[in-house]
Image (tube, rainbow, N blue to C red):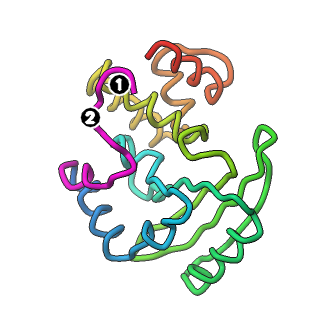
């Protein structure tokens, strides 16, 4: 991960030592066993909560990797189909088939985002790792500014790019920072 950030995002223990939201999310993940239920798909909590740029109402975003899309879909229906707010949709991003599963458990909205790509190669994971590094480099002022923009309605990647003066497609431009690790 370049600069030793000290976080293995695949092991949720780091959440226990985090802020109040991270500690609560740790308990929710343990109590609901969602990551265990997804263990066949290399799940990782991603998005804003692991890097503490979440705002109230942020989803618990979980990235997964499947080998067979239909099998994954059926498995999600079996495991989570009874949960409140359950939905499942399929679409393509940058030529990659995606399955997105939404449901609510323990008062949190979960969003499972799955592709055939290994999780570490998925954009959502790569963005999080890059953003984590940027927050380490730039400190709390960047974090506060990103949170402020998110409260105004910006998505995470556009918010980072606006703060850092990066132009163009934020989702692709941020990936260019990987090379600088």
Report the label total.
Answer: 2
Structural crowding at the residue carrying mark 2, measured as other residues with C-alpha within 10 Å and reported as few (<14), some (14–19) or many (≥20):
few
Quarter of image, res 36: bottom left
Residue 150: horizontal and vertical position, in percent? Answer: 47, 40
- Marks 1 and 2 in Cβ contact (< 8 Å): no
Is residue 6 shown in magenta?
A: yes
**Residue drawn 63% across and 66% down?**
101
Distance from Cα at disc 1 to Cα at disc 2: 20 Å
Name the residue nearer the viewer: 156 or 176. Answer: 176
Residue 166 vertical position relative to residue 118 in the rendered view, above or below: above
Residue range of the region highlighted in magenta in the rendering: 1-18
**Residue drawn 39% across and 50% down?**
10
Residue 37: horizontal and vertical position, in percent? Answer: 48, 73
Residue 11: horizontal and vertical position, in percent? Answer: 33, 52
Q: Secondary structure at mark 1?
A: helix
Question: Is residue 12 shown left or right of residue 68?
Answer: left
**Residue drawn 62% across and 26% down?**
170
Name the residue nearer the viewer: 70 or 157. Answer: 70
Residue 124 vertical position relative to residue 5 in the rendered view, above or below: below
Which label number is shown at residue 6? 2
Residue located beneath label 1 in the image: 142
Question: Is residue 133 shown left or right of residue 167?
Answer: left
Name the residue nearer the viewer: 23 or 14. Answer: 14
């Amino acid at each position: 991960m370049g600069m030793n950030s000290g976080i293995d995002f695949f092991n949720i223990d780091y959440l226990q030592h985090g802020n109040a939201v991270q500690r609560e999310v740790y308990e929710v993940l343990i109590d609901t066993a969602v990551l265990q239920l997804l263990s066949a798909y290399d799940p990782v909590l991603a998005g804003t909560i692991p890097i503490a740029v979440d705002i109230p109402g942020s989803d618990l975003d979980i990235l997964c990797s499947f080998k067979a899309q239909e099998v994954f879909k059926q498995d999600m229906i079996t495991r989570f189909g009874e949960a409140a707010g359950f939905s499942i949709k399929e679409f393509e991003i940058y030529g990659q088939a995606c399955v997105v599963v939404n449901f609510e458990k323990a008062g949190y909205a979960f969003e499972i985002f799955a592709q055939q790509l290994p999780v570490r190669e998925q954009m959502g994971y790569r963005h999080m790792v890059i953003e984590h590094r940027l927050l380490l480099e730039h400190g709390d002022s960047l974090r506060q500014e990103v949170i402020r923009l998110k409260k105004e309605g910006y998505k995470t990647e556009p918010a980072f790019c606006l703060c850092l003066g990066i132009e163009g497609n934020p989702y692709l431009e941020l990936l260019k920072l990987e090379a600088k690790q």
